[in-house]
């Protein structure tokens, strides 16, 4: 009995040491460029086409209003302006007549200056795999050669392209929906913001991080990159095991 308890304690101790080591490694990685490099590997389409797109495929995202929905429609409108002959398809589960969410996407793109006759809902897609199948079926109805530009979140681009290439052999390119960074000078110093002669004892001890862009922004951006990359690589693994990519 004692030997069994001893073995159990050793297993628990080893598991805790492993978890602690992984947590330490994860924390160290946040202070390196590696999270960005891992994230960057998700938004490139292998062997992108140089042809002008005939179709701009907007992946649905989280809806409107919502971060991914608004970002994707913003970039979709920009892509449509740069490619005036391309048709815009928005991949959604339901068509606009049956879904307020689909209608919201149409209205958002139209608000950005893209005429109604250029925008369509590609309905029937509940996930990336099914949306790729619906795209393939729709393109099969058209005898003209097609080139598709993908507009989606950066981390979702690689999986979308792989899912499409699994269902049809067409040229692909992408226009990832990156957030636009501020260009204003952001460093500051604590004494610039405090009321003179009112600093407390606590305030005098707390370090001034106003000039450290890494602690204020880059560290948290790396945390987001690791989170998004982990989720997306897990999805890629699942899709590969299913034979969808």
Image (cartoon, grey):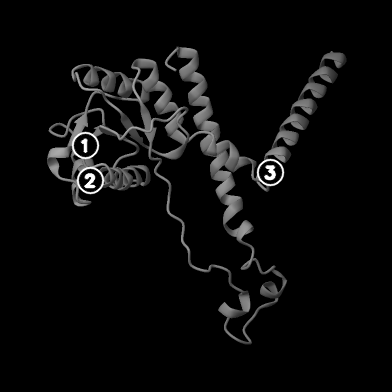
Q: Which mark is residue 27?
A: 3
Q: Nearer the viewer, residue 65 or 87?
A: 87
> Considering depth in this image, is 111 or 195 the residue closer to the camera?
111
Residue 99 picture quarter: top left
Question: At 33% from the left edge and 32% from the top edge, which residue is drawn?
Answer: 51
**Relative to 27, is 160 on the left or the right?**
left
Q: Position of residue 238 (x, y in %)?
A: 49, 19
Viewer can see residue 176: yes
* Quadrant assignment for the C terminus: top left
Residue 156: x and y in percent read 43, 33
Image height check: is 213 above or below 189? above
> Residue lying farthest bottom?
197
Q: Position of residue 230 (x, y in %)?
A: 55, 32
Q: Which mark sits nearer the N-terminus, 1 or 3?
A: 3
Classify 235 as above or below 90.
above
- Count of numbered tags: 3
**Which is closer to the viewer, label 2 or label 3?**
2
**Location of residue 117 by image quarter:** top left
Marks 2 and 1 close (CB-CB < 8 Å): no
Q: Secondary structure at mark 2?
A: helix
| First in residue order: circle 2 vs circle 3 | 3
Circle 3 residues within 10 Å: few <14, some 14–19, many ≥20: few
Residue 35 relative to residue 143: left or right: right
Asked which quadrant contains residue 76, the reply is top left
Residue pointed to by mark 2: 109
> Does label 2 or label 1 sit earlier along the sequence?
1
Q: Give the numbered dot on residue 102.
A: 1
The quadrant in which the N terminus is found is: top right
The kind of secondary structure element at disc 3 is helix
Q: Residue at x 66, y 73 (%)?
A: 203
Residue 26 badge: none
């Amino acid at each position: 009995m004692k030997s069994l308890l001893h073995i159990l304690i050793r297993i628990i101790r080893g598991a805790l040491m492993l978890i602690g080591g992984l947590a330490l490694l994860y924390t160290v990685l946040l202070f390196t460029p590696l999270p960005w490099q891992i994230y960057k590997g998700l938004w490139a389409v292998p062997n992108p086409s140089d042809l002008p797109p005939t179709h701009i495929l907007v992946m649905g995202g989280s809806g409107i209003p919502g971060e991914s929905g608004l970002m994707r429609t913003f970039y979709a409108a920009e892509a449509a302006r740069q490619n005036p002959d391309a048709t815009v398809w928005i991949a959604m589960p339901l068509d606009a007549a049956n879904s307020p969410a689909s209608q919201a996407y149409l209205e958002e793109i139209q608000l950005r200056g893209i005429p109604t006759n250029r925008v369509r809902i590609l309905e029937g897609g509940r996930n990336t795999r099914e949306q790729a199948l619906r795209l393939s079926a729709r393109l099969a109805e058209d005898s003209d050669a097609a080139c598709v530009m993908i507009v989606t979140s950066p981390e979702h681009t690689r999986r979308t392209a792989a899912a499409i290439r699994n269902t049809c052999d067409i040229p692909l390119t992408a226009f990832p929906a990156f957030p636009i960074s501020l260009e204003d000078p952001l460093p500051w110093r604590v004494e610039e913001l405090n009321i003179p002669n009112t600093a407390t004892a606590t305030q005098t001890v707390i370090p001034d991080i106003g000039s450290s862009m890494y602690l204020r922004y880059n560290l948290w951006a790396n945390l987001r990159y690791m989170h998004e990359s982990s989720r997306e690589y897990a999805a890629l693994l699942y899709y590969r095991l299913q034979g969808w990519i």
